[in-house]
Amino acid sequence: MVAPKGLEGLIVADTEISDVRGREGFYHYRQYSAVELAKKRSLEDVWYLVYNGELPSRAEREEFVAEVKRYTAVPDPVRELLPKIAAVGDPFDLMKALRSAYSLTASHYGFKATYDVDAETLRRYAMQTAAVVPTLLTSLYRLHHGKEPIEPKPELSHAANYLYTALGEVPSDEHVRAVEQYMILTLDHGFNASTFTARVITSTGADLGSAVLGAMGSLSGPLHGGAPTRALAMLDAIGSPENTERWLREQIQGGGRLMGFGHRVYKTEDPRSAMLKELATQLRAPQVDFAKHVESRALTLLEEMKPGHELHTNVEFYAGVVMDAAGVPREMFTPTFLTSRVMGWTAHIMEQAASNRIMRPLSRYVGPPPPQPVPDPE
Ligand code: ACO
């Protein structure tokens, strides 16, 4: 049985957490449409849903939010090391700095192998991880820019604290809601590469910290979570409506990828992109009109130059436009994606650990035929 390259179309596990219906342009978390959840519910509610399978009652919400707030502060021994981590890297890369800081946090908390812990302990590790990641990120961001880290305010929501601890000012409701909706939309998405990575690592019985670290590395790639900064950079590089057609044509002709277009599963418009476009319009984002112009030209050219591939706009094209309008600095685009996707990863880690078998596929050897005699050293 030979799997197709990139494992396209292959089902590798059962999950109750989320799914993507690529032909319909629909995806869901548990039993609810993710887009409807983003329109109607808070990030904390959706986080609770992916962990527990049901939306919370009022009392459950209060308890959950209180639990999140217990874990948002960076533990002292790690906090002391953050200035050193924020000074490393040429150029500095927030995703890499987060990796180092989170690795220390997981060690500090003493996360044990998933093989050795019960479901309740693993759930606590998941909460500790998803709650502290935004504070680690915003602290590192501020330190790198010569500013002191800011403690989250207990009265603010998770998304509001993210903006507040990054920017140092209590953000407007409009900006908070935009970032919160973006986070809900990107919280989970079936067996994307980083979630799959987390589940492969979990399948060995390794600790949750190791699985999250692997997923972070996977997300950072430009073909996955690294695309929103590049999508906005593409708009900058195009520069003007007059330049659009020529720039895009040259890029595609040269074998380059248009960032924010194409998707392995969606063969129609990505519903996340549709909602983010709406959000960007509501926010009167500075780049939105130009982005719409580039999108429409890009879709026409992709159809003409890559016929039969059904390439559409994906989540990343308008993600940067929305985050930019909500005041999120560019270097925090992929990290912002991570602050929500870590909720999805940790839900998947718990699901994998609860019904595990080590993932150990085969490869087809295509090198020189063995065994050749091993030559004696010269
Ligand atoms: N721009 C130009 N051509 C493209 C693009 C694109 N964005 N995406 C796919 N194609 C072309 C490929 O060149 C290929 O054409 P060819 O057969 O003539 O060489 C054809 O469409 C099929 O592409 P694949 O690479 O087989 O598609 P795959 O499913 O493997 O890749 C991916 C999906 C990685 C998202 C791809 O579309 C891409 O590179 N997009 C740009 C990066 C991006 O936006 N990433 C974010 C994805 S969303 C997320 O992870 C949250």
Image (cartoon, rainbow, N blue to C red):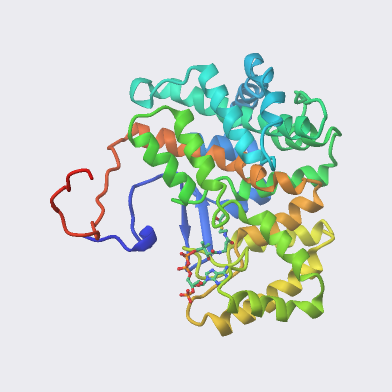
- Is residue 255 depicted above or below 318 in this figure? below
Give the residue at x 38% y 34%: 202
- Is residue 339 depicted above or below 84 in this figure? below
Instruction: Say whether residue 44 is left or right of residue 369.
Output: right
Q: Residue furthest front?
A: 378
Q: Residue furthest top?
A: 76
Give the residue at x 53% y 80%: 306
Give the residue at x 54% y 17%: 108
Q: Quadrant of residue 92?
A: top right
Residue 29 lies, in percent from the top left, at: 51, 47
Instruction: Say whether residue 366 is left or right of residue 95.
Output: left
Residue 232 lies, in percent from the top left, at: 73, 60
Residue 313 lies, in percent from the top left, at: 61, 67
The answer to whether any part of residue 135 appears in the image is no
Front residue of this view, candidates 216 and 45: 216
The answer to whether any part of residue 175 appears in the image is yes
Q: Quadrant of residue 35?
A: bottom right
Looking at the rendered structure, the number of numbered marks drawn on it comes to: 0
Residue 211 lies, in percent from the top left, at: 45, 35
Q: Residue furthest bottom?
A: 304
- Is residue 49 depicted above or below 312 in this figure? above
Front residue of this view, candidates 92 and 82: 92
Give the residue at x 63% y 34%: 97
Q: Quadrant of residue 229?
A: bottom right
Instruction: Say whether residue 198 is left or right of residue 132.
Output: left
Q: Please identify the quadrant where the N terminus is shown.
A: bottom left
Q: Please identify the quadrant where the C terminus is shown.
A: top left
